[in-house]
Amino acid sequence: MWLGLAITCATSFAWALGCESPKDFEASHLQVKASDCIACHQADYEGAQKPLHMNLYPQQCGSCHDNARWAPARFWHPFPLDGQHALTACWQCHTGNPPVFAGTSPTCSVCHAGKFESSTFPGHSAFQQTCRDCHSTSAWKPATGPHPEAKFPISTGVHQGYGCLDCHDTTRGVNSAANTNCVGCHDGVHERAVLDPIHQALGLSDYPTGDSAPNFCLSCHPSGSR
């Protein structure tokens, strides 16, 4: 009896899909396209919470899932989708219908160029377009930049009023202590031709000679002062 009922149910479902028999349904299911999954799995899509799918993820289930089980999914992203990115619809960055994923740049400024260009406090025109140097994914404010004031103040003292790229050499990497160019900024009485003999006369064993990184001054003057 149970076998007969199972066959009847399968046959009824197959007929609902326009199949001639359970065998035809079986073949159709194996050949279903990624874009067709949602026809049967709309409730799964709407109920998914980890992560939330509704109106955020595309309805092409086969983009991330296979026939075996929902988890683990094949989903991979070049950076964590946390903070505000967890609530951002995929197609806000991945355009097309269906959305195109491969080849989309992970660079922040691709999506946030308008925010970067319109920022007035502080003015971003001299900044590198590396948003994550100063911002988290939780919100634009508060930002951790634009400068580590506690270590190297630029809002007061002799270093105020300079643009980021006056001191930071972008060819040496992203803005940090590692890409500062102290020697390139300081000339006149601060040129090495003047400073080298003064420091050597003090008998400083750790004062560099010859070629050295242009930010070697920070070893002894980490805050930019004497």
Image: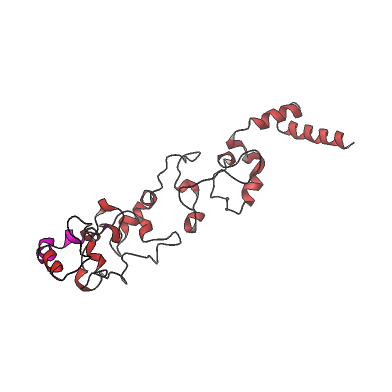
Horizontal placement of 101 versus 17: left or right?
Answer: left
The color scheme shown is secondary structure
Quadrant holding the N terminus: top right
Q: Quadrant of residue 29?
A: top right
In the rendered structure, does residue 188 fall within the stretch colored magenta? yes
Q: Is residue 163 visible?
A: no
Indicate the position of residue 113 as horizontal and vertical percent values: 34, 52
Indicate the position of residue 148 as horizontal and vertical percent values: 32, 67
Indicate the position of residue 7 as horizontal and vertical percent values: 82, 33
Q: Quadrant of residue 137?
A: bottom left
Is the residue 81 above or below the residue 188 in the image?
A: above
Farthest right residue in view: 1
Q: Which residue shows up at 61% across the image and 36% down it?
A: 36
Indicate the position of residue 168 as horizontal and vertical percent values: 24, 58
Is the residue 99 above or below the residue 121 in the image?
A: above
Q: Is residue 93 visible?
A: yes
Horizontal placement of 163 versus 64: left or right?
Answer: left
Number of numbered labels in the structure image: 0
Q: Name the chief secondary structure element in magenta.
A: helix
Q: Which residue shows up at 73% across the image and 34% down it?
A: 16
Quadrant holding the C terminus: bottom left
In the image, the segment drawn in magenta is: 179-195
Q: Which residue shows up at 63% across the image and 32% down it?
A: 32
